[in-house]
Amino acid sequence: MDQVTSADGTTIAYTTQGAGPALILVSTSMDDHHGLDATAAALASDYTVVGYDRRGVGQSGSGGPYAPEREVEDLAALIQAAGGSATLAAGSGGCGLVLEAATALGDAVNAIYLFEPPFIIDDSRPPVPADWVEQVEALVAADRRSDAVELFMTQVVGVPAEYVEGMKADPSWEASAAYAHALGHDGRILAGTQDGKPLPTDRWSVGRPAVVAVAEHSEPFFHAAAQALLTQLPRGRYESVPGLDHSAFWTAPDTVAASLVTALRATSS
């Protein structure tokens, strides 16, 4: 992997493929860039796609004490390495970081594509526990990484408890446990957006083209969150992805790539 140095001296590892304008794929905090390999490959015919390991994950460094601002600085360094401007795209938990970066970095961000931001803004699903980040970090500190992932899956994602033992049998569970220390990163970025209350109106300012996509069969709270967010995006566009659910950003890369390319072209015209 190539490397770039962030403002605080932390090394951020990244890969590049394809041709065209730069697009940076932002993973969730508990996944390295390989989680979006198929999505990156599907976009490479239209973009120069940058996939990177977020700080504390994969081959990237951790830096000092975690703060969301450091992750925005990481993206600023990647954008500079990509030529000075880039489109940002993310699914689920990564959407919060994209919104923070687009607000902070202004015209360096050409456009954004958000697949199902996990905001909880009404009673369409229970809010996440207010102290879940602290609970996860305490479990990691006690070397109970698998328990930290279980807490996240059941209390934040909303996976029924009876499904957890089957999930633990899959090799992906161990991979998730290896990155459990980073689970709270997205939690800190998303603070104040998953408590069943309306989205804050003074947090983000994104004047660039923006697409908020939701899969047809996803839970109602994703649809509600998208519509609420769009009221804050002056150049925003709603995109429905037919026949799929929340997993599509990872499991249906060709469909997601087509959605991104088509919708961003329409929004930018």
Image (cartoon, grey):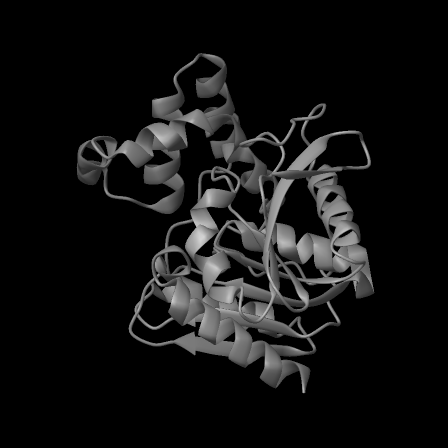
- Where's residue 14, x and y in %? 62, 43
Q: Quadrant of the C terminus?
A: bottom right
Figure quadrant of the N terminus: top right
Q: Residue at x 50, y 34 (%)?
A: 183
Residue 46: quarter of image: bottom right
Is residue 216 shown left or right of residue 211? left
Seen at 76% across and 50% down, the residue is 81
Q: In this orientation, does residue 203 appear?
A: no
The mark total stands at 0
Looking at the image, residue 210 lies above or below residue 50: below
Left or right of residue 34: residue 264: right
Which residue: 42% across, 59% down?
A: 249
Compared to residue 214, the image places residue 162 above or below, namely above
* 101 and 258: which is toward the camera: 258
Which residue occupies the foreground of this view, 186 or 262?
262
Residue 98, position as x, y percentages in the image:
64, 55
In the displayed structure, 100 sits above or below 180; it is below
Q: Point out residue 227 in the picture as x, y percentages from the top left corner.
A: 52, 73
Q: Quadrant of residue 18?
A: bottom right
Q: Is residue 128 left or right of residue 186?
A: left
- Where is residue 48, by image quadrant? bottom right
- Does the image show residue 171? yes
Query: Vertically, is 74 above or below 48?
Result: above
Residue 225 or residue 44, whichever sits in front: 44
Q: Percent from the top left, x then y, of residue 13? A: 64, 37
